[in-house]
Image: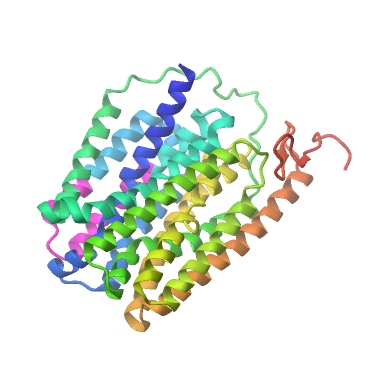
Amino acid sequence: MARRDTARTMLGASGLTVLGSISPFLLGAQAVLMQRDLGFGPARLGVAVSVFFGVAALATILGVGAFTRLGRRVGLVVAGGLVAIGGLLVATVVQGWWALALAMAVLGLANAACQGTANAAVATALPQRRRGLGFGIKQSAVPVAIMFGGLAVPTTTVLLGWRSTFVIIAVVGLVVALVGATRPAPRASATARQDNDPPPDRAPRGPLLLCGAAVTFASAAANFLGAYLASWAHDVGLTVEQAGLLLAVGSASSVLVRIAIGHRADRRYGGNLPVVAGMTLAGAVCLALLGAVPQIWAVLIFGFLAFAVGWSWPGLLLYAVARLGRDAPTQASSVVQAGAFLGGALGPALLGLVVSLLGFAVAWYVASASFVLSAVLVVAARRGFRHDLQTRPPAQPFGYGGGQEQPRYTTRPPDAPM
């Protein structure tokens, strides 16, 4: 039964993340058609995507820990209801760019609710030995959302129009809200905190903020890739349908890599942040080559690799931060989640402006530099976390630094002499 509950929690968190994050990728995959029908250009496309992530970031920052306190039942009702409202707004009301931006704001608020509920479930409901895999599966939902966005173009969009895709997510959101409303009320936890318990052991703020900044820069580049690769591929020579399929195939590869590295992380004692830094550097190379070689073959190869390697780090980073979050893993992961949303807000808008003013090639170079800066910040955060473990060891021994059979390093008891 425990294994079944673990699998249900992982898949539920992943499905909820897909539902919350799919909207901007539907917008990106169908951008050519939506821009034609609603009358806006690349810069406004980026702003609409940025509104989505900006609202999500603000809601996450203001509501840190809210979904841990409210529980999954209320979280599902709120998240599903907001997705249903936002999807119906796009499908029925939107006739111009301003209405689209308003609907994307509602969907961004829905994404914050979806991600907060899913992160709380993975960070607290899963056993420790399964959280790496859990975050890997949960974060694999983002490329699944991109894959669905890409597959929607040659299927649902061609047959029924782009509005039909938002009708579908609205219906799914309504189902999620109904599931949450009909869930049994949770029983009181036997492990609830008592008044005489020692104060919670918090993660160090400095390294945590560095991780938040790192994921902001990395997310800016990655979300620009997700929002604009289809448009770039179409400019280079692919059809709208072929560009959508490229998004789908690249996203599918990212799903497999995220799950694989999450599973591997559960089999070692830390050493995750260097892997994250290496993957973002690989993404930087791929984005730079997208700008340097405006050919169909280059878009196919480097676009695919940018997804498969350069955008497979989010689950591993969330797991690493939650693991180092000590007694507050949900709050620690919320800092990273807020950084991801902030990067999603800034990246498409600013880089979309670069596209409008200077062209796609320059925008790919800027996105590549953003990945490089993220890798530098991740390395700096790692040094901060290690210093904190040495100078402020947790009450229970904590293994870190990697290692398969045993950790390379283990913290000393708090009262031991330095």
Q: Which of the 4 image quarters holds residue 222?
A: bottom left
- Residue that lies at the very extreme toward the right in this rendered image: 417
Query: In terms of depth relative to the viewer, which is nearer, 191 or 11?
Result: 11
Asked if the stretch drawn in magenta spans residue 97, the answer is: yes
Q: Give the residue drawn at x 36%, y 69%.
A: 349
Residue 61 appears at what percent x and percent y? 45, 50
| Residue at x 52% of width, y 39% of height | 330
Q: Nearer the viewer, residue 173 or 367?
A: 367
Which quadrant is the C terminus positioned in?
top right
User: In the drawing, does residue 359 fall left or right of residue 130?
Assistant: left
Asked if residue 11 lies left or right of residue 92, the reply is right
Residue at x-position 35% and y-position 47%? 144
Q: Between residues 145 and 380, which one lies in front from this camera angle?
A: 145
Magenta stretch prevailing secondary structure: helix
Compared to residue 165, the image places residue 39 above or below, namely below
Most distant residue in the front direction? 297
Residue 391 located left or right of residue 325: right
Residue 41 place in picture, x, y as percent: 23, 73
Which region is colored magenta?
85-114
Q: Position of residue 13 (x, y in %)?
A: 40, 36
Q: Is residue 323 magenta?
A: no
Quarter of the image for the N terminus: give it.
top left
- In the rendered view, how is the structure colored? rainbow
Q: Position of residue 325 (x, y in %)?
A: 61, 41
